[in-house]
Image (cartoon, rainbow, N blue to C red):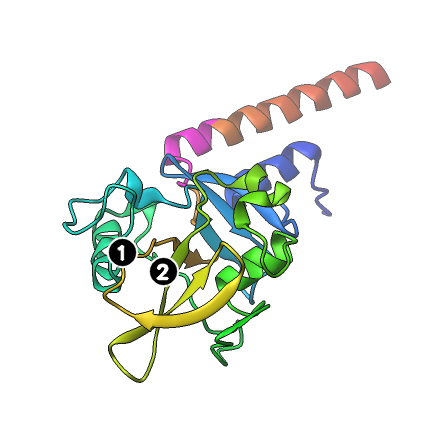
């Protein structure tokens, strides 16, 4: 006997799969009570950014060495990321600083402007629609999705062969370059892909499926009565 998926069945399937169509560009979502932004256009998996572009200004995860404005050395920024992962922030431990490499693993681009292949470069130029010598805070698109953005310098996770240096991006102009790790810059955490939504508890899922099946049965009975 051929089985036809009803509207109830489709909805039940969506509940089981945690459905939702992917959308191009930036999408706001929440995981573990934390506000996040997903960039579906970057790389093969997309990239999740913290919505708060200067989280360390208010949440230090107990890490020492972070200035009151959120700035820190590269080494402290790495400790901050480690502590964030230990806290399973937003329900995941996959956080890191953004990468200065291109999405295909080449690079880094620079020192230069218009490095659109790096993670923050892509966000600044491609998603933000900005040009050289503009500030990230002037992007209407980015202001719709992010909070606490700073016209400042953000450390990347990418080091140079000289262990004293690391790459950074200046959001007050759009230049990607590198400098000594001891300087005090900002940190912005990212992770590949989307953070998985918390699964629906088994009892709740069964109840939802039961209600859907009950509704479908009642509609079928009504249809039979009408035909008779």
Of helix, strand and loop, which one carries label 1?
helix
Residue at (27, 62) in percent of width and height: 183
Say which of 174 and 226 sits in front: 174
Q: Position of residue 63 (x, y in %)?
A: 16, 49
Residue at the far right: name it. Answer: 227
User: Which residues lie in the magenta part?
Assistant: 198-207
From the viewer's perspective, tell me whether residue 89 is left or right of residue 76. Answer: right
The mark found on residue 81 in the picture is: 1
Q: Is residue 220 visible?
A: yes
> Which image quadrant for residue 93?
bottom left
Q: Position of residue 222 (x, y in %)?
A: 74, 16
Say which of 16 and 33 sits in front: 33
The mark found on residue 192 in the picture is: none
Say which of 21 and 7 sits in front: 21
Q: Is residue 41 visible?
A: no
* Badge 2 or badge 1: first in the primary sequence: 1
Q: Are marks 2 and 1 in contact (CB under 8 Å)?
A: yes
Q: Position of residue 145 (x, y in %)?
A: 54, 40
Q: Judge whether residue 199 is colored magenta.
A: yes
Residue at (25, 55) in percent of width and height: 72
Q: Judge whether residue 195 is colored magenta.
A: no
Residue at (50, 41) in percent of width and height: 146
Q: Residues within 10 Å of mark 1 (few under 14, many from 20)?
A: many
Which is the main secondary structure of the residues drawn in magenta?
helix
**Disc 2: which residue:** 97
Residue at the far front: name it. Answer: 133
Counting labels gives: 2
Q: Is residue 47 above or below residue 60?
A: below
Marks 2 and 1 sit apart, C-alpha to C-alpha, by 7 Å
Say which of 68 and 158 sits in front: 68
């Amino acid at each position: 006997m051929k089985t036809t998926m009803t509207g109830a069945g489709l909805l039940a399937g969506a509940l089981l799969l945690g459905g939702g169509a992917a959308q191009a560009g930036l999408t706001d979502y929440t995981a573990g009570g934390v506000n996040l932004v997903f960039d579906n256009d970057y790389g093969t998996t997309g990239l999740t950014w913290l919505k708060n572009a200067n989280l360390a200004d208010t949440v230090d995860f107990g890490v020492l060495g972070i200035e009151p404005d959120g700035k820190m050395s590269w080494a402290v920024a790495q400790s901050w990321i480690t502590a964030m992962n230990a806290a399973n922030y937003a329900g995941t431990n996959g956080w890191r600083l953004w990468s200065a490499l291109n999405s295909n693993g080449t690079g880094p681009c620079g020192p230069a402007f218009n490095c659109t292949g790096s993670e923050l470069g892509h966000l600044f130029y491609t998603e933000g629609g900005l040009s050289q010598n503009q500030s990230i805070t002037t992007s209407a698109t980015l202001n719709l999705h992010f909070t606490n953005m700073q016209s400042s310098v953000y450390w990347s996770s990418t080091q140079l062969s000289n262990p004293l240096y690391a790459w950074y991006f200046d959001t007050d102009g759009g230049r990607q370059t590198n400098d000594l790790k001891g300087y005090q810059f900002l940190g912005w955490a990212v992770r590949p892909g989307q953070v998985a939504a918390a699964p629906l508890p088994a009892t709740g899922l069964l109840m939802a499926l039961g209600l859907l099946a009950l509704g479908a049965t009642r509609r079928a009975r009504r249809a039979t009565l009408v035909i008779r």
